[in-house]
Image (spheres, rainbow, N blue to C red):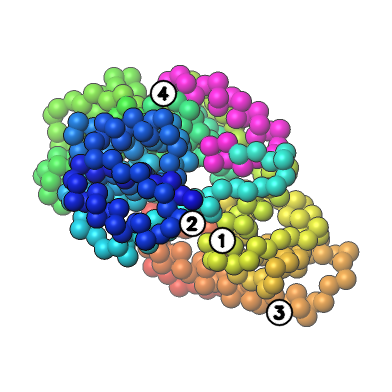
Amino acid sequence: MKKILIVDDEIEMLESLNKILSYRKEFKLTLVNDSQQGLDLVQKQKFDLIISDLRMHPVSGLEILKGAVKNFPDSLVIMISGYGTIEASVEAIRSGSFDFIEKPFTSKKLFSCIDRAFKEQEVHSPGESDESTKTFSGIIYKSKEMADIIEVVKKIAPGDINVLITGESGTGKELVARAIHNLSKSNLDLFVPVNCGALPENLFESELFGHERGAFTGAIKRKPGLLEFANNGTFFFDEIGELTRSLQVKLLRMLEERKIRRIGGQEEIKIDVRIISASNRNLEKGVREKTFREDLFYRLSTFQIEVPPLRERTDDIIPLAKHYLKTICKKNDYDEKRFTVDAEKALQEYSWPGNVRELQNVIGRTFILSSGNIIKMENLAIPFSNRNNLMASKFIDLDYVNAKEAIFEKFEVEYLTYHLKNNAGNISKTAEECGMDRRTIHRLIKKYNIIYKPRNDN
């Protein structure tokens, strides 16, 4: 039985939702037309799902959403409103709402949204049977290395010091940053991430600080920057080492003065954000080589956390692989698959140069290429050049392996072409999504003679 709370100050809407949802016998409904009573309820009781109107008095739907997320993080929330705007929907989603539905809506759309919410909740539940596997703020781990990092996160999160997270690409630096935010005093405010290498400098500055109308060609209206949007929350600079020197100067000024100025503007805007940064580069080396400002480095790295590569925390490989496999099976309505002992051994012995991101992508490709519910070592979609040593001592049908390799290469071409096209030829973004580095992407493009339209920032 799913416990559902519906909060709306319009009696007609409340009665309509009651009539629609009463058709589902597995739903136990609680109806409230007083928003203050709704807030009191979500702070005291756990509901599986909360459906709330956005604009209410004396308490808004966003306040009810934040109250629910703070007290019972597992509760799902769907916001509804007759005043649908992009800003309202973005704020609702960023504050923890599963979805935002604009009135009027059909019963079919409502049921579809509810079913997706419950299904996604099941998918994101790790369900790991190994008692030694733990989860913390979305991080699945078993290794002592990650356990030590999480203990550090718990200690520094309640403060407001700036944190620099270092480690190779794909190790999960953003997950660590989100864990710090989730335990911080600003956890009900926004966590705003930005990839410093994803945009050209002129666009990045506009995104970061905002701009006034007429500041440059195409600036047809005022646009607040992301730093302004994150006020009172947490701002995450991913790949901070990619910032140009001129942007480093402007960021340093913001950190020192806690003020920003939109492009083309005169007004200085006060902001209060916690800065968490991440880099796969050695920033101390960058300081020595004069590519990264020393004063900015020390501002950003009040506390530093290094996330080790997956090859140095092999105890995490199988729990993560099982979680990703179970997740993709559920998403595709497929019976649960499992790895053989040899397959698990192969996963643990592979070096994972792309770390956790590569592992996730490999499991996704393995799911597509494998048939049946048992995944053997030869079914794994690990690049074949890295599997020869793993299979050397095994009696494997080479014709079968070669056939699998041909299938894998075809899939690899289609997979890479899709992401290149989807990212308009942006190599950095494609590498990030595929769990590879830029050099590997360029090598595969050359190997398979993939034709794509490159962007200027490649």
Front residue (pair 243, 301): 301
Q: Earlier in the sequence, mark 1 or mark 4?
A: 4
Q: Amino acid at mark 4?
A: Lys
Q: Earlier in the sequence, mark 2 or mark 4?
A: 2
Q: CA distance from mark 2 to mark 4?
A: 30 Å
398 to 385, vertically: above or below: below
Name the spot of residue 429 as percent of width and height, x first. Answer: 44, 54
The residue that disc 3 covers is 403
Quarter holding residue 184: top left
Front residue (pair 295, 416): 416
Name the spot of residue 111 as percent of width and height, x first. Answer: 36, 60
Name the spot of residue 341 as percent of width and height, x first. Answer: 81, 57
The reply, left or right, for residue 284 in relation to residue 387 is: left
Q: Amino acid at mark 3?
A: Ala
Query: Magenta stretch: residue 455 in it?
Result: no
Q: Which mark is residue 330?
A: 1
Q: CA distance from mark 3 to mark 1?
A: 28 Å
The residue that disc 2 covers is 119
Neighbourhood count class around disc 3 (C-alpha, 10 Å): few under 14, some 14–19, many 20 upward? few
